Image: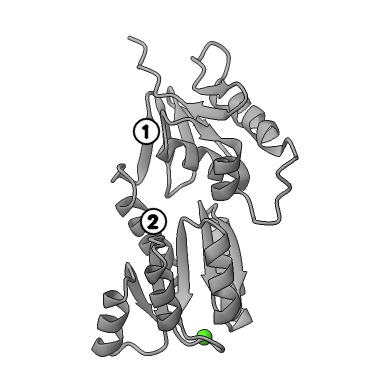
Amino acid sequence: MRVLVVEDEKKVANFIKHGLEEERYIVETVNDGISAIDVVMNNHFDAIVLDVMLPGKDGLTLLKEIRDSGISTPVILLTARSTVEDKVAGLDLGADDYLPKPFSFDELAARLRSILRRSSPEKSTKLRAGDLILDTVSHLAYRHGREIELTTKEYALLEYMMRNKNRILSRSTITQHVWKHNFDPESNIIDVYIKRLRSKIEKDDEKPIVQSIRGVGYRLREVANEE
Ligand code: CA
Protein backbone atom coordinates (compact mmCIF):
# COMPACT_ATOMS: atom_id res chain seq x y z
CA MET A 1 0.00 0.00 0.00
CA ARG A 2 1.20 3.46 -0.83
CA VAL A 3 1.48 6.08 1.90
CA LEU A 4 2.23 9.81 1.69
CA VAL A 5 4.00 11.42 4.66
CA VAL A 6 3.66 15.22 4.87
CA GLU A 7 6.11 16.53 7.46
CA ASP A 8 8.51 19.50 7.30
CA GLU A 9 10.96 18.29 9.93
CA LYS A 10 13.26 16.13 7.81
CA LYS A 11 14.39 14.04 10.78
CA VAL A 12 10.85 13.12 11.75
CA ALA A 13 9.86 12.57 8.10
CA ASN A 14 12.81 10.20 7.59
CA PHE A 15 12.09 8.36 10.84
CA ILE A 16 8.49 7.74 9.74
CA LYS A 17 9.52 6.88 6.17
CA HIS A 18 12.10 4.29 7.20
CA GLY A 19 9.79 2.78 9.78
CA LEU A 20 6.95 2.49 7.31
CA GLU A 21 9.24 0.99 4.70
CA GLU A 22 10.19 -1.68 7.19
CA GLU A 23 6.47 -2.28 7.56
CA ARG A 24 6.43 -2.88 3.79
CA TYR A 25 4.68 0.29 2.71
CA ILE A 26 5.65 2.21 -0.40
CA VAL A 27 6.34 5.65 1.08
CA GLU A 28 6.67 9.13 -0.40
CA THR A 29 7.46 12.22 1.62
CA VAL A 30 6.67 15.90 1.05
CA ASN A 31 8.09 18.64 3.26
CA ASP A 32 5.66 21.53 2.83
CA GLY A 33 1.95 22.16 2.52
CA ILE A 34 2.03 23.80 -0.91
CA SER A 35 3.69 20.90 -2.73
CA ALA A 36 1.66 18.41 -0.69
CA ILE A 37 -1.64 19.51 -2.23
CA ASP A 38 -0.16 19.14 -5.70
CA VAL A 39 1.14 15.63 -4.95
CA VAL A 40 -2.19 14.55 -3.40
CA MET A 41 -4.20 15.86 -6.37
CA ASN A 42 -2.04 14.11 -8.94
CA ASN A 43 -1.41 10.73 -7.32
CA HIS A 44 -3.23 7.97 -5.58
CA PHE A 45 -2.34 7.06 -2.00
CA ASP A 46 -3.90 4.46 0.28
CA ALA A 47 -3.28 6.62 3.36
CA ILE A 48 -1.78 10.01 4.28
CA VAL A 49 0.17 10.81 7.46
CA LEU A 50 -0.24 14.57 7.79
CA ASP A 51 1.60 16.86 10.19
CA VAL A 52 -0.50 19.81 11.37
CA MET A 53 2.31 22.35 11.76
CA LEU A 54 3.68 22.94 8.27
CA PRO A 55 5.22 25.94 6.50
CA GLY A 56 3.30 27.37 3.56
CA LYS A 57 0.00 25.76 4.32
CA ASP A 58 -0.86 24.09 7.61
CA GLY A 59 -2.14 20.53 7.86
CA LEU A 60 -5.71 21.45 8.77
CA THR A 61 -6.06 23.79 5.76
CA LEU A 62 -4.57 21.08 3.59
CA LEU A 63 -6.96 18.48 4.98
CA LYS A 64 -9.92 20.75 4.24
CA GLU A 65 -8.74 21.23 0.64
CA ILE A 66 -8.24 17.47 0.23
CA ARG A 67 -11.75 16.69 1.49
CA ASP A 68 -13.34 19.62 -0.40
CA SER A 69 -11.95 18.19 -3.62
CA GLY A 70 -13.66 14.88 -2.92
CA ILE A 71 -10.55 12.85 -2.04
CA SER A 72 -11.47 10.34 0.65
CA THR A 73 -8.01 8.81 1.27
CA PRO A 74 -7.67 7.98 5.00
CA VAL A 75 -5.68 10.64 6.89
CA ILE A 76 -3.85 10.39 10.23
CA LEU A 77 -3.01 13.82 11.67
CA LEU A 78 0.19 14.34 13.64
CA THR A 79 0.50 17.29 15.95
CA ALA A 80 2.59 18.71 18.73
CA ARG A 81 -0.54 20.10 20.34
CA SER A 82 -3.09 17.73 21.72
CA THR A 83 -5.84 19.96 23.01
CA VAL A 84 -9.41 18.72 22.71
CA GLU A 85 -10.19 21.66 20.37
CA ASP A 86 -7.43 20.61 17.97
CA LYS A 87 -8.58 17.01 17.93
CA VAL A 88 -12.19 18.02 17.34
CA ALA A 89 -11.19 20.44 14.56
CA GLY A 90 -9.09 17.77 12.84
CA LEU A 91 -11.71 15.04 13.08
CA ASP A 92 -14.48 17.39 11.93
CA LEU A 93 -12.43 18.37 8.90
CA GLY A 94 -12.33 14.73 7.89
CA ALA A 95 -9.27 13.20 9.55
CA ASP A 96 -9.63 9.48 10.28
CA ASP A 97 -7.31 9.46 13.26
CA TYR A 98 -5.15 11.74 15.34
CA LEU A 99 -1.76 11.14 16.96
CA PRO A 100 -0.10 13.68 19.29
CA LYS A 101 3.70 14.07 19.15
CA PRO A 102 5.84 12.57 20.48
CA PHE A 103 4.40 9.23 19.46
CA SER A 104 5.77 5.74 19.38
CA PHE A 105 6.31 4.37 15.91
CA ASP A 106 4.53 1.13 16.85
CA GLU A 107 1.41 3.09 17.66
CA LEU A 108 1.52 4.92 14.33
CA ALA A 109 1.94 1.59 12.52
CA ALA A 110 -0.99 0.03 14.39
CA ARG A 111 -3.22 3.05 13.70
CA LEU A 112 -2.30 2.91 10.05
CA ARG A 113 -3.23 -0.78 9.87
CA SER A 114 -6.47 0.10 11.64
CA ILE A 115 -7.52 2.85 9.20
CA LEU A 116 -6.59 0.64 6.24
CA ARG A 117 -8.85 -2.10 7.66
CA ARG A 118 -11.69 0.39 7.95
CA SER A 119 -11.57 1.11 4.23
CA SER A 120 -11.25 -2.58 3.35
CA PRO A 121 -13.94 -5.29 3.53
CA GLU A 122 -11.36 -7.45 5.37
CA LYS A 123 -11.40 -6.55 9.08
CA SER A 124 -8.78 -9.02 10.26
CA THR A 125 -5.03 -8.34 10.32
CA LYS A 126 -4.79 -11.51 8.20
CA LEU A 127 -5.92 -11.28 4.59
CA ARG A 128 -7.21 -14.46 3.00
CA ALA A 129 -7.76 -15.65 -0.55
CA GLY A 130 -8.66 -19.33 -0.49
CA ASP A 131 -5.72 -21.17 1.05
CA LEU A 132 -3.37 -18.18 0.79
CA ILE A 133 -3.02 -16.10 3.94
CA LEU A 134 -1.15 -12.80 4.28
CA ASP A 135 -0.33 -11.64 7.80
CA THR A 136 -0.21 -7.81 7.72
CA VAL A 137 1.58 -7.65 11.09
CA SER A 138 4.42 -10.16 10.51
CA HIS A 139 4.42 -9.52 6.72
CA LEU A 140 4.65 -13.24 6.04
CA ALA A 141 2.42 -15.15 3.67
CA TYR A 142 1.29 -18.74 4.23
CA ARG A 143 0.00 -21.35 1.86
CA HIS A 144 -0.79 -24.90 2.99
CA GLY A 145 1.10 -24.11 6.19
CA ARG A 146 4.17 -23.18 4.16
CA GLU A 147 5.75 -19.89 5.31
CA ILE A 148 6.58 -17.51 2.48
CA GLU A 149 9.01 -14.63 2.92
CA LEU A 150 8.42 -11.64 0.68
CA THR A 151 10.50 -8.63 -0.28
CA THR A 152 9.00 -5.18 0.34
CA LYS A 153 7.80 -4.87 -3.23
CA GLU A 154 6.39 -8.40 -3.42
CA TYR A 155 4.58 -7.81 -0.15
CA ALA A 156 3.11 -4.48 -1.33
CA LEU A 157 1.97 -6.08 -4.56
CA LEU A 158 0.41 -9.10 -2.87
CA GLU A 159 -1.29 -7.01 -0.17
CA TYR A 160 -2.86 -4.74 -2.77
CA MET A 161 -4.04 -7.69 -4.86
CA MET A 162 -5.44 -9.53 -1.83
CA ARG A 163 -7.33 -6.45 -0.67
CA ASN A 164 -8.83 -6.37 -4.16
CA LYS A 165 -9.17 -10.10 -4.76
CA ASN A 166 -11.31 -11.33 -7.66
CA ARG A 167 -11.11 -7.89 -9.30
CA ILE A 168 -9.33 -7.39 -12.60
CA LEU A 169 -6.56 -4.88 -11.92
CA SER A 170 -4.99 -3.01 -14.80
CA ARG A 171 -1.26 -2.45 -14.82
CA SER A 172 -1.82 1.28 -14.33
CA THR A 173 -4.07 0.69 -11.30
CA ILE A 174 -1.46 -1.60 -9.75
CA THR A 175 1.19 1.04 -10.48
CA GLN A 176 -0.78 3.73 -8.67
CA HIS A 177 -0.97 1.68 -5.49
CA VAL A 178 2.34 -0.10 -5.42
CA TRP A 179 4.94 2.05 -7.21
CA LYS A 180 6.26 5.54 -6.67
CA HIS A 181 5.13 8.34 -8.96
CA ASN A 182 8.37 8.53 -10.97
CA PHE A 183 7.62 5.08 -12.35
CA ASP A 184 7.97 4.59 -16.12
CA PRO A 185 4.62 3.31 -17.44
CA GLU A 186 6.32 1.75 -20.47
CA SER A 187 8.42 -0.62 -18.40
CA ASN A 188 7.48 -4.26 -17.88
CA ILE A 189 8.41 -4.16 -14.21
CA ILE A 190 4.95 -5.19 -13.02
CA ASP A 191 5.11 -8.35 -15.11
CA VAL A 192 8.57 -9.08 -13.70
CA TYR A 193 7.34 -8.73 -10.11
CA ILE A 194 4.18 -10.74 -10.76
CA LYS A 195 6.37 -13.53 -12.08
CA ARG A 196 8.56 -13.42 -8.96
CA LEU A 197 5.53 -13.37 -6.71
CA ARG A 198 4.01 -16.35 -8.51
CA SER A 199 7.18 -18.35 -8.12
CA LYS A 200 6.75 -17.93 -4.36
CA ILE A 201 3.00 -18.33 -3.88
CA GLU A 202 2.33 -20.95 -6.57
CA LYS A 203 4.78 -23.72 -5.82
CA ASP A 204 4.82 -27.12 -7.54
CA ASP A 205 1.29 -28.51 -7.66
CA GLU A 206 -0.42 -25.60 -5.90
CA LYS A 207 -3.30 -24.13 -7.86
CA PRO A 208 -2.50 -20.92 -9.76
CA ILE A 209 -3.88 -17.96 -7.88
CA VAL A 210 -2.75 -15.00 -9.99
CA GLN A 211 -4.39 -14.89 -13.37
CA SER A 212 -3.14 -12.86 -16.35
CA ILE A 213 -5.87 -11.00 -18.15
CA ARG A 214 -4.58 -10.54 -21.67
CA GLY A 215 -4.10 -6.92 -22.68
CA VAL A 216 -5.38 -5.63 -19.34
CA GLY A 217 -3.52 -6.78 -16.27
CA TYR A 218 -3.97 -9.31 -13.49
CA ARG A 219 -6.50 -10.80 -11.12
CA LEU A 220 -5.88 -12.62 -7.86
CA ARG A 221 -8.52 -15.29 -7.70
CA GLU A 222 -9.94 -16.82 -4.59
CA VAL A 223 -9.13 -20.49 -5.13
CA ALA A 224 -11.41 -22.94 -3.34
CA ASN A 225 -9.69 -25.11 -0.74
CA GLU A 226 -8.84 -28.52 -2.03
CA GLU A 227 -10.72 -31.15 -0.08
CA1 CA B 1 5.92 20.13 11.53
Answer whether labels 2 and 1 touch (C-beta < 8 Å): no
| Quadrant of res 34 | bottom right
Q: Quadrant of residue 174?
A: top right
- The image's colour scheme reads one colour
Q: Nearer the viewer, residue 108 or 40?
A: 40
Q: State how many labels appear.
A: 2
Position above or below: 138 against 103? above
Between 58 and 16, the one lying in front of the other is: 58
- Find disc 1 in the rendering and name its residue: 128
Residue at which label 2 appears:
113
Cα–Cα gap, marks 2 and 1: 16 Å
- Measured as percent of width and height from the top left, residue 74 is found at 38, 62
Residue 141: image x %, image y %?
48, 35
Which residue shows up at 49% across the image and 14% down it? 207
Q: Position of residue 32 (x, y in %)?
A: 58, 81
Task: Identify the residue at image location x=43%, y=31%.
Answer: 167
Of the numbered discs 2 and 1, the one sitting upstream in the chain is 2
> Taking the image as drawn, is residue 207 in sight?
yes
Name which residue type carries label 2.
Answer: Arg
Which one is nearer the viewer's eye here, 174 or 141? 174
Q: Residue at x 46, y 74 (%)?
A: 50
Mark 2 crowd level (few <14, some 14–19, many ≥20, 10 Å Cα):
some
Q: Is residue 227 above or below residue 50?
A: above
x 35%, y 17%: residue: 224
